[in-house]
Amino acid sequence: MLTLVKNLKTKKSLKKRNWFMKRSVLTAVCCAIIFSGTVVAQENTATQVKIELDQVVALALEQNYDVKLYKSYQEQAATDDKYSVGVLLPVINATGSRIWNSTDQRQVLANDSVTQRKGVRSNSLNGTLQLTWTLFDGAKMFATRARLSEIEQQGELNVKGQMVNTIAQVVNNYYNVVRQEQQLRAIVLQMSVSEERVKLADRRLQVGTGAKPELLQAKVDLNAQRTAVLQQQTIIQQLKDQLNGLVNMQLPAVYNVADTIIIDLDLKEEEIATNIENTNFSLLSYKKSIDVAAFALRERHGERYPVINFTSAYTYSHSINSLVINNFTPLDNRNNGFNYGLTLNMPILNGFNNRRNIQQARILVERQTILYNQQKNLVDVGVKNAFVNYDNAKKVLLIEEENILVARENLFISLESFKRGVATFIELRTAQQSLADAYNRLINARYLAKIAETELLRLNSGLLK
């Protein structure tokens, strides 16, 4: 009798221990499947290269076509600025010619005498070296050079702005891949639960305590999740290809990404919004557009003033005639020498073109100012909206991280209760769906928080720092 009691106690103890072991194992499996990158397709990932976000960003800044285009525009503007010193230098031109002639000549003089020659040959050599140097043009030359310098600086700002936008694209795309892979692992977890449901439903049907619709529904759910896995793998591959496209296909054909979404939860709205007009590259570029238009206005004002040029030229000419009809015509004639002086070009009336050009340039300055203020307003609103999204995403994230623990425990309890015949099939399926929904919300909350963080850093150009 004592032996029987001991055996019963031992069985109860073992049963209780097994229950706790199963609970611990299930919890560990849930955590590992969702937050580890080595559970799904472990046999394939062993040969795949893991690509970090910093590597993709570095490649994008070198290989992205949009960045290359803006760099090309900037190089073009830099070339114009480099050679803008030419507006301060004189213009020197040289011309030359060498001509051979063969002519027939006939002359009738006043005394009715006639003189004629056939095949008269001559040749001439001419050359001119001319210099023109603008000494004063109403300071237009200085305004032109300053305008080109501002355009070159604006090109640099546009390159940096495109770099920031490209980095934001890379970050969002990279973590979208991470998000979808987490979603894939969540589906795999649901598959493991559905497989357990199929086994339990089949076992209950065999012993006569279950119904066949429960088994069929469990199989339907399992097959739906298998289909979802295939669809999710397609989405992941498409996103990886899009990410590879951002870096001009420089990533390996098959690669892995990180398994977690890293979020900075300490951003402050004041730090982002303060002095944003001096950190946002888009605003700085618009401000440069105002400066460019202002220097263009100065150029138009300069056209109202007289232009004073210093000119100088050296000329050389040499002609040789084999025969001449007129005895006073030289057989050999050579001239060379130089000249210099000043020229003045005073605009008096040209159809009011100068006045019209000045008014148009002034309107352009005003329009660029309006565009800057409009962009400043958009950036300010963007910061406020992004921070609202960021703050709400953080709150949702805290709720969902707590909720996922509740959903896991609920599923485990429902599964164990179903095994003991306490819970119904519907209760187990509801708990399973609740966990799936909780994972979806948690994964999306993390991704949306990252998107909001990235947008805030994009607006104040923090991504490039």
Image (cartoon, helix red, strand yellow):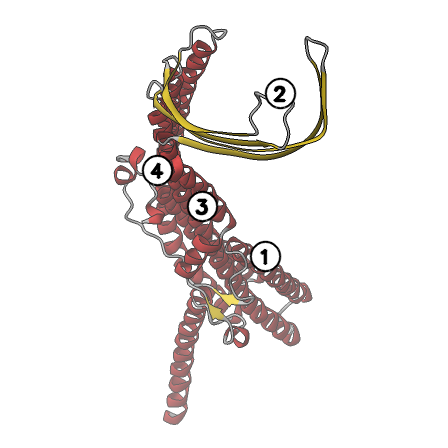
The tag earlier along the polypeptide, 2 or 3, is 3
| x and y, in percent, of residue 451 in the image | 42, 47
Going 68% across and 65% down the picture, which residue do you hit? 216
Going 47% across and 45% down the picture, which residue do you hit? 72
SS assignment at label 3: helix
| x and y, in percent, of residue 65 in the image | 52, 49
Report the label total. 4
Which residue has dot 4 on it?
280
SS assignment at label 1: helix
Q: What residue type is labelled 1?
A: Gln
The tag earlier along the polypeptide, 1 or 3, is 3
SS assignment at label 4: loop
Q: Which amino acid does label 2 sit on?
A: Asn
Q: What residue type is labelled 3?
A: Lys
Which residue has dot 1 on it?
238
Distance from label 1 to label 3 (Cα)?
29 Å
